[in-house]
Amino acid sequence: CRFHFRVTFIALSLFIRLYLPRSTFKPRAEALILSIDSMLGLDEDNAVEGEENDAVNQLNIDPMAIQMARGTLSRRLSHIERGEYFASSAVILLDSLQQAMEATEEDQTSALFTMKQLALGTLNYGNIGSEDVAEILYSLIPDYRMSDDHDNACTSHFASLCPPRSQSVTSSSGLSVTYPPSFIITAAEARCEQRDLSSQVCFDVKSDEQTDIPTSIPDGYYNYFVHQSRSEDDYLTESFRPLDFSMTIAELEIEQIALETEISELERNLQDLEGKIGGGDSPKYGADGELYGIRDDCVSLEAGKYEYGVCFFQGATQKEIGSHSSTDLGKWEGMEIHKETGLRVMKWTNGAKCWNGPKRSIEASVTCGRETKILTADEPDTCRYVLAMESHIACDDRFKLQNDL
């Protein structure tokens, strides 16, 4: 893996000089520029007045198109020269790092770290896309080429790279991994689809038969493809997306204080809500605040000659039908779950005292129902009243299980 990483970086630094097909484009471009200069009378040593128009007219070529083609060739040659300059400069650094790799283990570790940083920097600041990285990698490492015919200037080097291959290698941690990574293989497949693998492009600088003047220079001319910057959807774009370190420590501290203040306010609001609906450790409105929705409701039922009425969180009464006076049956005490039946039991206690008996009280057992209402009323013992009620608050998971719903 160290070897693969090292040679990958070398390939990035020597992009122009390692296997990439500049050997056919460069002499062809230089020869064309000389021909165009001569045709347009730009060659001061050989220029003859009037020759420009005669040569151009004879070939029936638009002089502006020729000049634009010349400009394109010049720019691409300039790119090649600049790349060769940087590559030759990088050789000095790479040679020193190579020597360090052959020295002590400590030097090897330091050199490897430096190589990794340089490789990452080249990928990032060079804005190099996955497809270019794949092309370099497959061009450089012999194990991934179909043949070693890359020195043949007439053959497109893509013919030896496609289809892309992979192999199992052992990582520094001893694990078996597939190399290159899957995103490189995918990028290589895309590059192979874009290029003409069967193209045969040769140029003999001594021959006069290949000096036809083109009026435009397409991408891929004599196997020269213009480098494209990494796209937004490229795998490496997300990998090298910059982190935002623009905020200072002071700004972060201010933001922290604001967030802590917001948290405190939310906690106070939560406590207020729990106090209202009985959440948290408060049973005021039931364990899940289920009574909150009926906290202000009252329901009643006529049974026999009496009307029984209960108000949640208030009181319960009994009165004769048609009478305006009532008897206090108790004040709201709360609601609990019966241990055996699982029913909710509401209680009103400490009502008016019976003559020569206990204080009146009332209990209501609640089952599941669409509406909150009293179904039946009974007095099983003196001054102790029992109601059967139904309400949506009892339509819980327990009721669902008990009734196989």
Image (cartoon, rainbow, N blue to C red):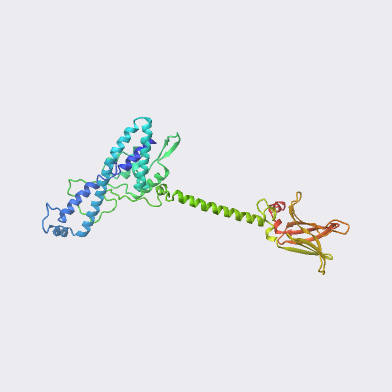
Q: Residue at x 45, y 36 (%)?
A: 176
The N terminus sits in image quarter: top left
Q: Quadrant of residue 103?
A: top left
| 315 to the left or right of 195 | right
Quarter of the picture containing the C terminus is bottom right
Above or below 68: residue 103? above
Residue drawn where x is 35% and y is 33% of the image: 101
Which residue is located at x 79 percent, y 62 percent? Answer: 317
Q: Quadrant of residue 312?
A: bottom right
Most distant residue in the left direction: 48
Q: Can residue 192 be seen in this view?
A: no
Measuring from the top left, give residue 337's x and y in whole percent: 74, 52
Locate residue 309 relative to residue 259 in the image: left or right.
Answer: right
Q: Nearer the viewer, residue 249 or 108?
A: 249
Q: Position of residue 214 (x, y in %)?
A: 22, 55
- Find the residue positioned furthest to the top: 104
Q: Where is residue 346 in the image (x, y as percent from the top left)?
A: 75, 56
Across and down, in percent, residue 10 comes to: 32, 40
